[in-house]
């Protein structure tokens, strides 16, 4: 063996990791969770499932908001998974002022808290309301629209796991086309959720002409933190829609949560963008475009789409067209990926 072949190139620790105390990253490149002054808005002891995207998304979002406000933050939480697994009576995992509202009135309660803070002269205290897709796109839809219409000074965050996971994986208006849920079984001529149904909540928020709307994903935590930080510096209604995969409801492996979220972004099914007063101002480019099949086949809720016969290829093609339309609409394709 020659001296040259005996040498082994030094491989440094992954500089892209978000682990606490990564000393190989500059301070401004670290996430909130990699900083010793993190607030730990949600501490240990909660009862989220293994690989829960919502627990991860909420921790990063709320810690970023805490850092942006220097700890002057009140959180309002709608009923849902996040509320249930963090506050089993009489315990709580929250380390911040936190209020549990009803399933559908988190935006209204947050509006009241913001008004109370103004009345007390506490303009330094900011208010965040949060809920899942059920409490946002369905049950809380009217209250949220009212908050937007009044332009109340609240940041609303939706943690979208695309169904009512807390009550048995029933369909919500954020459930994607052809997905199997407890109320949309993979049976009949149109198995799974009906294509063309549902609501695109970020676009609805944009239609209210509020100061800031953004989409984010647990697959890109720096982007998520940056958008929350930006939102906290803006007055008026703000809305951030975060994709948070649910291993239990989606039928995916707990260890694949981040990979699945990344495939949703890279396929174009979940575009990452920002908007102000109804106009898109920025979008996150896709560096490696993948077909939607790579995303769909990671989850049992889409397993029926890969059975032979029954027109399933056409159904997957329809989902691919949705992704392609997103890529064109939000200008997501990196120039290096252009044919």
Image: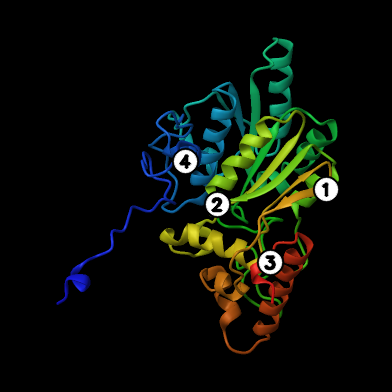
Q: CA distance from mark 3 to mark 4?
A: 28 Å
Specify the farthest residue to the front: 3
> Do residues under tags 2 and 3 come within 8 Å of each other at their CB atoms?
no
**Of helix, strand and loop, which one carries label 2?**
loop
Residue 279 circle label = 1
**Of helix, strand and loop, which one carries label 3?**
helix
Q: Quick one: label 2 or label 3, which is nearer the N terminus? A: 2
Q: Nearer the viewer, mark 2 or mark 3?
A: 3
Q: Which residue is mark 4?
A: 30
Pointer 1 local density, CA inside 10 Å: few below 14, some 14–19, many at least 20: some
Q: Quick one: label 2 or label 1, which is nearer the N terminus? A: 2
Q: Quick one: label 3 or label 4, which is nearer the N terminus? A: 4
How many numbered dots are placed on residues in this image? 4
Q: CA distance from mark 4 to mark 1?
A: 30 Å
> Do residues under tags 4 and 1 come within 8 Å of each other at their CB atoms?
no
Locate residue 79 relative to residue 247 in the image: left or right. Answer: right
């Amino acid at each position: 063996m020659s001296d040259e072949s005996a040498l082994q190139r030094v491989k440094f620790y992954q500089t892209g990791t978000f682990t606490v105390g990564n000393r190989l990253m500059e301070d401004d490149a670290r996430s909130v969770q990699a900083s010793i002054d993190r607030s730990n808005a949600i501490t240990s002891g909660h009862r989220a499932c293994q690989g829960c995207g919502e627990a991860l998304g909420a921790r990063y979002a709320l810690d970023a908001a805490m850092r942006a406000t220097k700890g002057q933050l009140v959180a309002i939480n709608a009923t849902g998974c996040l509320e249930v697994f963090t506050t089993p009576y009489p315990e709580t995992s929250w380390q911040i002022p936190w209020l549990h509202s009803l399933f559908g009135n988190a935006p209204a309660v947050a509006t009241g808290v913001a008004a109370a803070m103004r009345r007390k002269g506490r303009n330094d205290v900011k208010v965040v309301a949060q809920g899942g897709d059920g409490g946002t796109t369905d049950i809380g839809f009217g209250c949220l629209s009212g908050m937007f219409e009044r332009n109340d000074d609240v940041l609303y965050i939706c943690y979208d796991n695309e169904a009512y996971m807390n009550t048995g994986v029933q369909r919500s208006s954020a459930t994607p086309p052809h997905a199997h849920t407890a109320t949309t079984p993979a049976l009949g001529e149109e198995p799974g959720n009906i294509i063309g149904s549902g609501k695109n909540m970020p676009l609805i928020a944009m239609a209210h002409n509020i100061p800031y709307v953004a989409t984010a994903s647990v697959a890109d935590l720096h982007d998520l933190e940056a958008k929350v930080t930006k939102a906290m510096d803006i007055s008026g209604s703000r809305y951030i829609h975060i994709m948070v995969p649910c291993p239990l409801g989606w039928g995916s492996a707990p260890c694949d949560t981040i990979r699945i979220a990344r495939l949703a972004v890279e396929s174009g099914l979940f575009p990452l963008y920002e908007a102000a007063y109804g106009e898109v101002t920025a979008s996150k480019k896709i560096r490696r475009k993948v077909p939607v099949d790579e995303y769909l086949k990671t989850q049992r809720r889409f397993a029926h789409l890969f059975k032979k016969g029954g027109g399933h290829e056409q159904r997957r093609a329809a989902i691919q067209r949705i992704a392609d339309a997103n890529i064109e609409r939000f200008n997501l394709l990196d120039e290096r990926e252009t044919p």
